[in-house]
Amino acid sequence: MHVIPFRYFILLAGTIVSLSSIALIINYTIYQFPGNNYFPPNTPVMACIILLNYIGMILVFGKNNRVTCSGLELINFFVVMSIIALATNAVQLTPFSPIDKQIIKLEAQWGINMVSILEWTNKYQYFKYLLAIIYDTLPYQMSILPLCVIVSGRFYILKDYYFLLLSTTLLGFTFYYFFPTTAPASEIQNSLFAPEQIATGLKFHQIHHYIQPTTIEGGLIALPSFHAIWAILCVYLIKDWFIPCLLLSIINVLLILSCVLLGWHYPVDILAAIILVGLSYYLLTLVKVKSR
């Protein structure tokens, strides 16, 4: 399998880190909005453990052993997720106004009504409960599946996965910075919205009124839906394992549907997510062709 040259990861990662740094500097010098920290607790400790683990593998197995290569991929995975956390810290500090009202108006012209969608889902409580469980599986998928692929030694798929993660982050986060969204619960008054959904808009309101956010619950970016993007990428990650991939495809189709049926996202968010994944995959194929 063709492996993407390392320089493309440096380009993507460097661009994201540079733009995130610029956004943080702009906020520090001009707007001075407070914000949440999206890095996991004890991140420096985790980094040290992963690095020491890799050094130990080199000493025991040698640099080119598959076990040692797995340790290196664990570092790569940690770095990619840290870059996304840095970008999340930066993008929440956007100085621009949300475009949710425009989205609601656009969808109304298409005959889409979020309240009607919520009320329909609420009629089927077992289905709603199932969707809620599936929706909450994404963090576990994004944590466990890459580790399974690392253990299996399919490093070429990981390279594709990292490229798609970084490219969707670069494009999607940049769009959000200039055209932020706060999700349906922030604009539509309805008792069917969960507190975590309301928290998404609450965080945005607090940050832009110079109030330290009182919660880190809920989401951040509505358009495009990164829940949908990451669900698709998780399926791509295990494409070589037919049965698990088929099962996860079914689960994640329901996960993507749950984004709208449970009220987390506007339907247009899902459409934008699919377009963004398609564009990123097209870039991936171009890079592979160019580097042959």
Image (cartoon, rainbow, N blue to C red):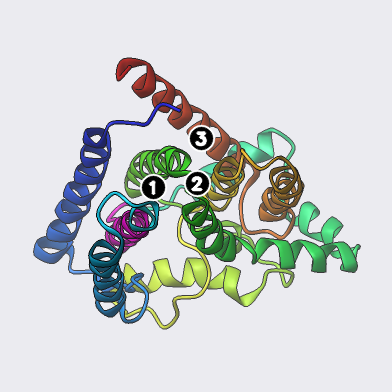
Q: Does residue 193 appear in the picture of this structure?
A: yes
Q: Position of residue 85 (x, y in %)?
A: 34, 62
Dominant secondary structure of the magenta stretch? helix
Task: State the CA–CA distance, disc 1 to disc 2.
Answer: 7 Å
Residue 141 covered by magenta stretch: no
Q: Kindly indicate the quadrant of the structure image that contains residue 215.
A: bottom left
**Precedes in sequence: disc 3 or disc 1:** 1
Q: Which residue is mark 2?
A: 223
Which mark is in front, 2 or 3? 3
Q: Nearer the viewer, residue 115 or 69?
A: 69
Q: Pointers 2 and 3 in contact (CB under 8 A)?
A: no
| Residue 7 numbered mark, or none | none
Evaluate whether residue 92 shows in this view. no
Q: Residue at x 39, y 44 (%)?
A: 162
Cα distance in 3D space between marks 3 and 1: 16 Å
Magenta region: 71-96
The answer to which of 262 and 190 lies nearer the viewer is: 262
Secondary structure under tag 2 reads loop
Q: Residue 72: image x %, image y %?
A: 31, 56
Which type of secondary structure does the marked residue at label 1 adopt? helix
Q: Amino acid at mark 3?
A: Val
**Three-letter amino acid code of the residue under disc 2:** Leu
Name the residue at 74% across, 52% down.
251
The circle drawn on residue 176 is 1
C-alpha span from label 2 to label 3: 13 Å
Q: Residue at x 58, y 59 (%)?
A: 141
Q: Is residue 284 above or below residue 114?
A: above
Residue position marked by numbered label 3 in the rendering: 277
Residue 178 at x, y = what percent? Answer: 32, 44
Name the mark nearer the viewer: 3 or 1: 3
Residue 127 lies, in percent from the top left, at 86, 62
- Name above or below for residue 13 compared with residue 40: above
